[in-house]
Amino acid sequence: MTVAVLQTAWLVPLYPLLAALLSLLWSPGLIKRTGPRPCGYLNLLMVLVAFGHSVLALVALHHNGEAGAAAINAPLRFNWIWLSTAGLQIGFEGVITEPALIAMAVITGLHALTQIYAIGYLELDWGWPRFFGCLSFFEAGLCALVLTDSLFFSYVLLELLTLGTYLIVGTWYNQPLVVKGARDAFLTKRIGDLILLAGLVAILPLTGSWNFHELAVWAGDQARQLDGAPLPWTWTLILLALVAGPLGKCAQIPLHLWLDEAMESPLPSTILRNSVVVLGGAWLLLRIQPLLALSPLVQAVLVAIGAATAVVASLIALAQIDVKRALSFLVSSWLGLLFVAVGLGDTGVADHLLLVYPLPMALLLMAVGTIVISTVSQDLTQLGGLWGRRPLMGLAFLTGAAGLMALPPFGGFAALRELLVLVSQSSQPLLLSAVVIVTNALISAGLIRVFGLIWGGVSTPFTAHCAEVLWLMGLPTLVLMGLVLHLPLLWALNGLFPLDPVPGWGPQGWPLLLSTLVGGGLSAFFYLRPHPLAQLPSGLGGLQAWLAHDMQTERFYQRTVVGLVVKLASLSAWSEQRLVDGFSGQTGAAALAGARRLSLTTSGRSQAYALTLVLGVLLMAAWLLSRQSVL
């Protein structure tokens, strides 16, 4: 039985996909009398089935000798041919591995908790079929992404996730800001997707395959053949194009603004998008890392972009007054550290950062959501004084924050300590070590700032009568809180990372712990009891406004990229109107004028027609005789 469960793990993406398809029956109103709620329960049921199958397959892998040996030593593979032509065969190649099963267990487990949470959060909302169907669509795409062994189908699935982002951000489509957020998120991610498409089309003639394992073998052969020689510049461009897709999906500079715009969607979708959906690009980046290792330039670009995003995004988060946006920029900051690890060529450290991230971030957003729904505000300046009324959710937020800080014995400490060891052995140890330490301090400060502005200080009119939330929201939050507290133990039981008395402690643990205490301590001093220095002096107020407006990045895009596109569109419209339409219009007018003049020669008299023919024949004969005499 356990072997069969493991061998059929490829069915996991089909459960939520079936739920998403069945949701269409409610969405256009084919099923009316039941109301929208049964659709939500159906989606939750299928998500629980997918989670149960993922967990049973993972248990079979670890506790059944036959199944475990089959999956670890010879991973189970499956293939579905989509297109077969002369010289080209494209199929969905899948492989069932231990990382894929762990990823699916995390994805489906978080989706199950989030859908329970959403039932309470959207209790009075009538858009359940569309919303829950999109959540299940997200889950199906992510599970298929971790199973596929094809670069081409990874791109296809990332495109579907981009479509899902557009649909789910636009859930409340009757609001102008929602429409703008959905459009901007879709278009920004499409930039990276189009460049990624160009890269995967260009790499096929070089490698002859889109299979990840075959690409890794090809990259190893090329590394031996090059033997230190520089990579051809065309190959470097192709590898840079492959990086563009993950840059957009992980909201890295310069494609980072979409995550901020996507905050207009309902908060349950924000939980999934900020915890697991953004990791789709990181998963693809890890799969193509053997290719990226061929080019030191590409690796340097990854390190530079990741380091810049880590520092800049954490600074921007400190100036945000919208709680969802403050946390969204911290998402980009943490993933920037992951890009640094991939750029330095250590997928083990990147895997660790990838695994410890989703549960704490989801817990942070769940705890914040219980406040947003009861206070009807997500403006940090309107909140405060909730520790006496909502201490349990405050503890949940602090637990999630501790999971992302370098604070032992939580999971984030070991991952960040490994990253600090990695950067200290790089070609720029001082600079990159400073980036990691400063980013950790800024992330700690940003998280404690949010906690202080919500649970610290004094009550406001919005929080004076803050009611308790439904148990449907409190229960998943507390369950997730327990998982975050035991995260190092869970990874140790799965044999991923050792469980020391203090997980991850080492020589580099002290500077990380000190940066956490400094960043979090200063933030607590300023925000737990509002301090006048928390607001910058008037002379520096422009700095705060500059950070609050994302360093004017959107205005910069409007004046450069968008402005260039508008100018090119105006030039195209002018050429279309003046040149193309003008030429065709003038040619047609000349033809009509000639036809009108020729019409005057038509008198209706046969003698005139005969004379015209005779004159034509005489002129033709004269021309032929003149040509003959010349020859």
Image (cartoon, helix red, strand yellow):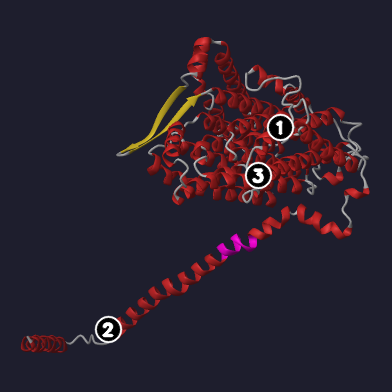
Res. 599 mark: 2
Residue at the (92%, 31%) spot, across then down: 388
The residue nearer to you, when weighing 284 against 622, is: 284
Q: Is residue 321 left or right of residue 91?
A: right
Disc 3/disc 1 C-alpha distance (Å): 17 Å
Disc 1/disc 2 C-alpha distance (Å): 91 Å
Q: Is residue 265 visible?
A: no
User: Looking at numbered disc 2 in the image, what kind of residue is underneath it?
Assistant: Ser
The residue that label 1 is drawn on is 417
Secondary structure state at the residue bearing disc 2: helix
Quadrant holding the C terminus? bottom left
The stretch in magenta equals: 558-566
Comes first in the chain, label 2 or label 3:
3
What is the magenta segment's predominant secondary structure?
Answer: helix
Comes first in the chain, label 3 or label 1:
1
The residue that label 3 is drawn on is 428
The reply to whether the magenta stretch includes residue 152 is: no
The residue nearer to you, when weighing 204 against 573, is: 204
